[in-house]
Amino acid sequence: ATNRRVEWLFGRAAAKEAVRRFLFKYHQARWTDADIPIWPDDSGKPHPLGPWREHTAAKIDLSITHTSKLIIAAVAANARIGIDIEVLGRSLSDDFTRGVFTHEELELAAHTGEAPTAVLRFWCAKEAISKALGTGIRYSPQDLRITAVDTETGQLQIELLGQWLEPFKQFKGRKNPIHTALFEGHAVATCLLPASLFETPE
Ligand SMILES: CC(C)(COP(=O)(O)OP(=O)(O)OC[C@H]1O[C@@H](n2cnc3c(N)ncnc32)[C@H](O)[C@@H]1OP(=O)(O)O)[C@@H](O)C(=O)NCCC(=O)NCCS
């Protein structure tokens, strides 16, 4: 429990730094960590709040992910962002694997030639898109369906199916790109979704 708390704290620190760096880089403005409170919404997605928001036209979205060895926070302007990491070598149980992936997805993973790592990449990708959507894994993870993999670039494609299309109708048929990579002993997935997909029509 102590470790989780430390991870949580470092996650907050990384998130504030990501926002501060953004504001410095694009607005040459210096803000302090105290100016950037991070608050989760009802689904648990963290949002950066504070007075700096009146000084930038950009809508900043935030994502945080942590293991006991690595903590990453990233921000995106005018897009929804979701990032997720898993420690390489972590073994997912057969039950878990069967629950979250379809046969076709597992075959796709096998074809990449990096089987156990590919499965971790795939799981990260599903969590990353669920974080960009802001729901977390609220419905069947099988219905965040991986439909293509580019083994050269690590780019995956995920389509929303089933119950996911109820709150996210606008995603029907959309092939969402997720970037995956290996970094510091982890699989890492990053998902960016254009903010325009979430604008409600007038
Ligand atoms: C949200 C979720 C994707 C987080 O992934 P994880 O691998 O467990 O943990 P990570 O370290 O990568 O991410 C944790 C961070 O995600 C963020 N997060 C939590 N809920 C979120 C949401 N709805 N949307 C976006 N981000 C969210 C938080 O910042 C959290 O860190 P914090 O508590 O320090 O602020 C995942 O826990 C989830 O979907 N949970 C809900 C349902 C569930 O557990 N289903 C299991 C089905 S197999």
Image: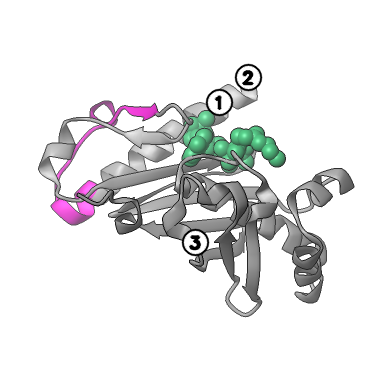
Q: Which mark is residue 173?
A: none
The quadrant in which residue 78 appears is bottom left
Decide if residue 191 is on the left or right side of residue 35: right
The quadrant in which residue 42 appears is top left
Whole-number angstrom distance, CA of label 3 to CA of label 2: 42 Å
Q: Residue at x 24, y 32 (%)?
A: 32
Q: Quadrant of ligand 1?
A: top right
Q: Nearer the viewer, residue 107 or 65?
A: 107
Q: Is residue 129 above or below residue 64?
A: below
Give residue 79's position: percent from left, percent from top: 33, 55
Q: Amino acid at mark 1?
A: Val
Residue at the limit of the structure toward the top, as seen here: 1
Q: Is residue 27 above or below residue 55?
A: below
| Proximity of marks 2 and 1: CB atoms separated by less than 8 Å | yes
Q: Amino acid at mark 3?
A: Lys
Q: Start and end of the magenta stretch?
A: 23-40
**Secondary structure category for the residue under label 2:** helix
Marked residue nearer the N-terminal end (3 or 2): 2
Q: Which residue is mark 2?
A: 2
Q: Nearer the viewer, residue 15 or 105?
A: 105
Q: Which residue is mark 3?
A: 172
Please check the rendered image and state whether residue 186 is part of the magenta-colored stretch, yes or no: no
Residue 96 is at least partly visible in this image: yes
Residue at the limit of the structure toward the right, as seen here: 94
Decide if residue 117 is on the left or right side of residue 144: right
**Secondary structure category for the residue under label 1:** helix
Q: Which residue is mark 1?
A: 6
